[in-house]
Amino acid sequence: MTKLGTMKHGHGHSHQQCGCGKQRLSTAVPHSIPRRSGFAFIQVVSRFAIDVLVKCWALCSTGLLAVLLFYWLYGGWVASIVVWISIFGIFYNYQDYLLYYPEVPKSSRLLVQSPQGWNVPFESLFIKARDGTRLHALFLKQPEGLAANAPTVLFLHGNAGNIGHRLVNAVAVYAAVSVNVLLLEYRGYGKSDGSPTETGLYLDSEAAVDFLYSRADINQRKIVVFGRSLGGAVGVHLATHSVFRDRIFAVILENTFTSIPHMATIIFSVKRILKWVPVWMYKNQFLSIKKIGQCSRPTLFVSGLADQLIPPYMMQLLFQESGSVYKRMCTFPTGTHNETWQCDGYCDVIRRFLQEVGQRLKVIMQGFIQVIC
């Protein structure tokens, strides 16, 4: 919730002080004509000067009035346009601070927990996005003999913290489902360079898939995209991208939203106003609800019904709009936004889903081979 500070404008009043000097008048009667002529000359000059001053004052008053009328008729509109453009600029750029929280908790940009304490084979590495941004990642790899055939999960996290805060969850899935896990740290988060933006996060996820495709020690045909919260929107991008969707084995979306404009009307109390704000005014849009119809990959929707941040009905909407011919919805009544993974049976659901997708792929391949033969 944001606080809008009111600006107090002080009105300075300038006081002009006029000094009135005292003039001593002589009562003596002039004795000569030159004195009278000189006085008459002074009177003429004074009257002329006063007349000029009066005319100048009238001219200045007319000019000032013209300036005021011009400002009233035109300057006011110009000022209004400038003010509204400024308000739009503030609203547009401040959105990043409302969506991305890479410094929550405070040490998130300094300390990223290592998997060393879990006795898990891992690699701490850096990859580069297409725009040159250096990204940090942790790769949890199954032991030799298992890694080459196991699915590899690309873990796309939420809008706060770093990948170290997801290690407990990632290690649990790694052990229970027998998968490799690549935890990607978005730009501006943890040890990654840059600043987070919607386009930037998309580039980061694409770089992660490219990295996995460059690994000869894993099964490149079993790349699973997992996205929670904000990561779900990034995952939808990958699953619907014309290049990267064909590289994805399956998609898992957990407690994610339909779009940022939709979320804004729910989080903020001025939803009646935000309802009329056009989409193009949102710097970060993440329009998953419009993209999900293009998703053809097998998709598992995991929804915690006790989620107090993202309404669970958004997951239902995404499920309904999904274009996948093989999609599953799994709900956990006690699942909260970030802790659904702690619910009983969570890892079992993921394991069964990946097994079903694998079996379905085998059936399709066998049918394809029979047609060729």
Image: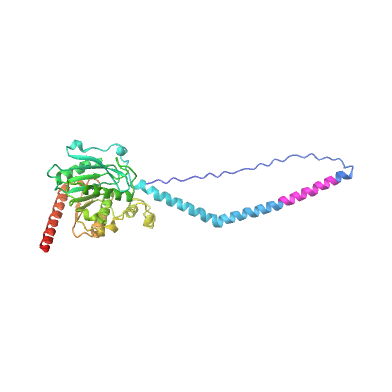
Q: Residue at x 43, y 50 (%)?
A: 89
Report the predominant secondary structure element of the magenta stretch: helix
Q: In the image as oriented, which residue stretches furthest toward the top?
A: 117
Magenta extent: 37-53
Here the colouring is: rainbow
Tell me, yes or no, whether the highlighted magenta stretch contains residue 40.
yes
Q: Residue 58 placed where, x, y %?
A: 68, 53
From where the camera sits, is residue 308 visible? Answer: no
Residue 71, above or below 127: below
Report which quarter residue 281 is drawn in.
bottom left
Q: How many numbered marks does the figure carry?
A: 0
From where the camera sits, is residue 122 visible? Answer: yes
* Of the pair 186 and 5, the residue shown nearer to us: 186
Q: Residue 346 placed where, x, y %?
A: 17, 48
Q: Residue 146 placed where, x, y %?
A: 13, 45
* Image quarter hosting the C terminus: bottom left
Tell me, yes or no, whether the highlighted magenta stretch contains residue 322.
no
Q: Residue at x 48, y 54 (%)?
A: 81
Q: Residue at x 21, y 49 (%)?
A: 213
* Of the pair 272 and 206, the residue shown nearer to us: 206
Q: Residue 65 placed where, x, y %?
A: 62, 54
* Of the pair 143 and 264, the residue shown nearer to us: 143
